[in-house]
Amino acid sequence: ICENSMSLSPRQREASFWLASVFDRIAVVMRQAAIISSQLDKLPEFAARKKKIVRRYDEAFAKLPGLILQKETEGSDTVRHLYLLQLNPEHISIDRRRFFDAMAAENIICNVHYIPVYTFPYYEKLGYPKGLCPKAELLYSRMLTIPLYYAMSDQDVEDVIAAVTRIAGYYRV
């Protein structure tokens, strides 16, 4: 913005730096917008693929008593961002951590979401005790997400299904 910032007063240098950082942020946002706009036409294709994967997962996992599946609201047209599996301890003898590790051993990377916020160290320091929302904590201890993204091949989907089915079957009560 200014070739010789040393000739500026401290206040002018600060303003110059602030303006440069604003322009840098605008440039980043404009690049992101360009990338997003180039992908907008593909959204129906991405959505259809994710819905197809969800249907295949639902079909495969519906018959596994160790799992509780997320239900769709009737009449909704949902494109899921995540595919949740909830372990049902009445029918499966493995906890989430061991299931997660078993999936990793099968080369399937899972994730854990929906951590009760008040269990973060910051909130614990503010005095929020564990046990504040027992149902949320119970769900958190039983849920994990499996891969769900539009670029998954049919073989990727079948590999995830095979791993989940194998682990759920092995630990079935």
Image (cartoon, grey):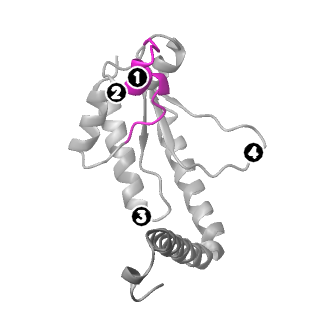
Residue drawn at 45 percent across, 86 percent down: 2
Q: Which SS class for mark 2?
A: helix
Q: How many angstroms separate mark 3 from mark 2 (CA)?
A: 26 Å
- The part of the chain drawn in magenta is 111-130
Q: Residues within 10 Å of mark 2 (few under 14, many from 20)?
A: some
Q: Nearer the viewer, residue 64 or 106?
A: 106
Residue at label 4? 76
Q: Nearer the viewer, residue 41 or 59?
A: 41
- Residue 128 is a magenta residue: yes
Which amino acid is tagged 4? Ser
Q: Which mark is residue 20?
A: none
Q: Which mark is residue 153?
A: 3
Residue at label 1? 141
Left or right of 3? Residue 29 is: right
Q: Earlier in the sequence, mark 2 or mark 4?
A: 4
Q: Which SS class for mark 1?
A: helix
- Contact between marks 2 and 1 (CB within 8 A): the answer is yes
Which amino acid is tagged 3? Ser
Q: Earlier in the sequence, mark 4 or mark 3?
A: 4
Number of numbered discs present? 4
